[in-house]
Amino acid sequence: MLINCVAYQHGRKLADLPVADISDYVARDDTFVWVALKDATPEELVVMQEEFGLHELALEDAQRGHQRPKIEEYGDSLFVVVKTVEMEGDELNIGEIDIFVGPNYVLSSRQNSSQGFLGVRARAEREPHLLQHGSGFVLYALMDAAVDRYFPVVDAFESELEEIEERIFTQSSQRDNIERLYDLKRRVMTLRHAVAPLLDAIGKLHGGRVPAMCVNSQEYFRDVHDHLARINTTLDTIRDTIGTAIQVNLSMVALDEGEVNKRLAAYAAIFAVLTAFAGIWGMNFKHMPELEWYYGYPVALTLMFGSSFYLYRRFKKAGWL
């Protein structure tokens, strides 16, 4: 679905265009065209290929979708894939924005994303001194907006991890803590799969040999690179903390099991004494003085329960009971 199709000249909006006129404006040296699509169909992308002259391999990737974040050069054009990440309750919704960039055009196509980029266009139009840098600045603005949306997700991860850590020593929630930690780790890795490849790829847009349309925007791409590096470092820290929290939680479970085993062992020892006494006096030998002694039975019971009480007190003092 077509969202916008606008021509710009010297950093200022020139006109809203019908799709059929795109190629005419792209041919002008002092003009560039910015087109935005949402959930584009293969047929719409084929039309855009004809108007912009898109490379067939880049078009094939856009039609297939589900691409790894990357930046690829095709002659004097770029094909950029950026993942969009949105929180929907406790789950992540992973979308994708495919960006075709040429000397005189920018074509963006977002898939499976409820948040649009109209604010990016409005911001760019308010800064004509930057927009006059052309398609390179537009690419930066789109990537910067997508990356900035990662920060609230990272903040939500940190808050959830702190909440779990506060409950980690609560015995009644140990199993729930393990489940939540593993679920959080899965979501952290999902976000990291969107960040890490893009962090590696964006180095192509600042420093060294830079595509011509990005030469005047290198410092802006370096800023995006810094944001991605910070997010990636934070995700690594969260992942390490999750691993530590899981180990601590498992240790707490093992300690609780050890306490239970100690109690069981203590009670088993107490009943073993009773069983030993009862076994001896229950063998029914004929020549056993205790069997015919008038006070034998109460003394036996006293000795059995006295021994049991003594063991109970010792175990209690040792902290086993």
Image (cartoon, rainbow, N blue to C red):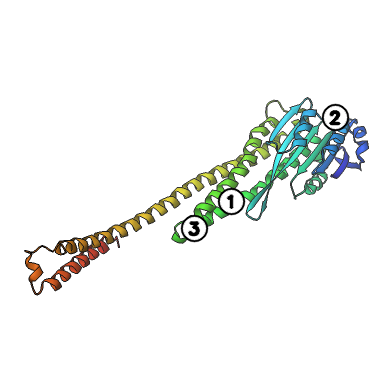
Residue 189, image x, y percentages? 59, 43
Instruction: Give the residue at x 79% y 34%.
Output: 100
Q: Is residue 281 visible?
A: yes
Residue at which label 1 appears: 157
Q: Earlier in the sequence, mark 3 or mark 1?
A: 1
Q: Secondary structure at mark 2?
A: loop
Horizontal side of residue 232 vs 38, given as left or right: left
Q: Which amino acid type is shown beneath numbered disc 2?
A: Gly
Q: Nearer the viewer, residue 145 or 284?
A: 284
Q: Which amino acid type is shown beneath numbered disc 1?
A: Phe
Residue 263, image x, y percentages? 31, 60
**Crowd around label 3: few <14 · some 14–19 · many ≥20 (10 Å):** few
Horizontal side of residue 254 vs 206, given as left or right: left
Residue at which label 3 appears: 166
Residue 245, image x, y percentages? 47, 50
The span from disc 2 to disc 3 (Cα, nearest Å) is 57 Å
Q: Which amino acid type is shown beneath numbered disc 3?
A: Glu
Q: Secondary structure at mark 3?
A: helix
Residue 89, image x, y percentages? 65, 56
Q: Earlier in the sequence, mark 2 or mark 3?
A: 2
The span from disc 3 to disc 1 (Cα, nearest Å) is 14 Å
Q: Picture quarter containing residue 214?
A: top right
Give the quarter of the figure containing the N terminus: top right
The span from disc 1 to disc 2 (Cα, nearest Å) is 42 Å
Q: Secondary structure at mark 1?
A: helix
Circles 1 and 2 in contact, beta carbons < 8 Å: no
Q: Picture quarter containing residue 279?
A: bottom left
Residue at which label 2 appears: 53
Q: Earlier in the sequence, mark 1 or mark 2?
A: 2
Horizontal side of residue 73 vs 235, given as left or right: right
